């Protein structure tokens, strides 16, 4: 199973599964299409947006786990 970590950059997270974009956007990270954000680590992006990185990480990894289980 693909496992996303705090230090992964946004571009790599989206490359694992484009569906991760919806999770990031729903959490409040609306700038994921911005070229600058593509090179930013998830932890950095969450900090800038005042988001809890552990909550976002759990949502992403839960999504990936459920998708793989299908």
Image (spheres, grey):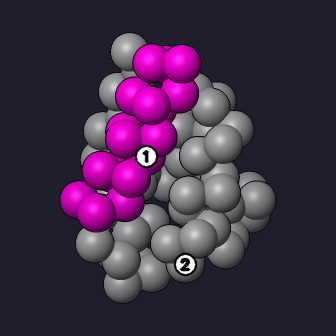
Residue 14, above or below 30:
above
Q: Which residue is mark 1?
A: 60
Is residue 34 or residue 27 the one in the foreground?
Answer: 27
Quarter of the image for residue 46 reads bottom left
Quarter placement of the C terminus: top right
Q: Does the magenta stretch mainly form a helix, a strand or a loop?
A: helix
Asked which secondary structure carries label 1, the reply is: helix
The span picked out in magenta is 54-70
Which image quarter is the N terminus in?
top left
Q: Can you give x and y, in whole percent of width and height, for residue 61 in the image?
A: 37, 39
Q: Quadrant of residue 31?
A: bottom right
Please name the residue shown 33% across and 51% down the image: 57
Residue 24: x %, y % from top left: 55, 61
The mark that comes first in sequence, 1 or 2, is: 2
**Mark pair 1, 2: CA separation:** 14 Å
Q: Nearer the viewer, residue 61 or 10?
A: 61
Front-most of residues 12 and 3: 3
Badge 2: residue crowd in 10 Å (few <14, some 14–19, many ≥20): few
Based on the picture, tell me whether residue 66 belongs to the magenta stretch: yes
Q: Is residue 14 left or right of residue 35?
A: left
Residue 11 appearing in the image? no
């Amino acid at each position: 199973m693909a496992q996303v970590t705090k230090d992964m950059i946004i571009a790599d997270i989206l490359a694992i599964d484009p569906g991760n974009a919806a999770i990031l956007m729903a959490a409040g990270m609306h700038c994921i299409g911005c070229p600058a954000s593509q090179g930013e680590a998830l932890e950095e992006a969450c900090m800038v947006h005042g988001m809890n990185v552990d909550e976002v990480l759990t949502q992403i990894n839960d999504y990936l786990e459920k998708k793989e289980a299908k």
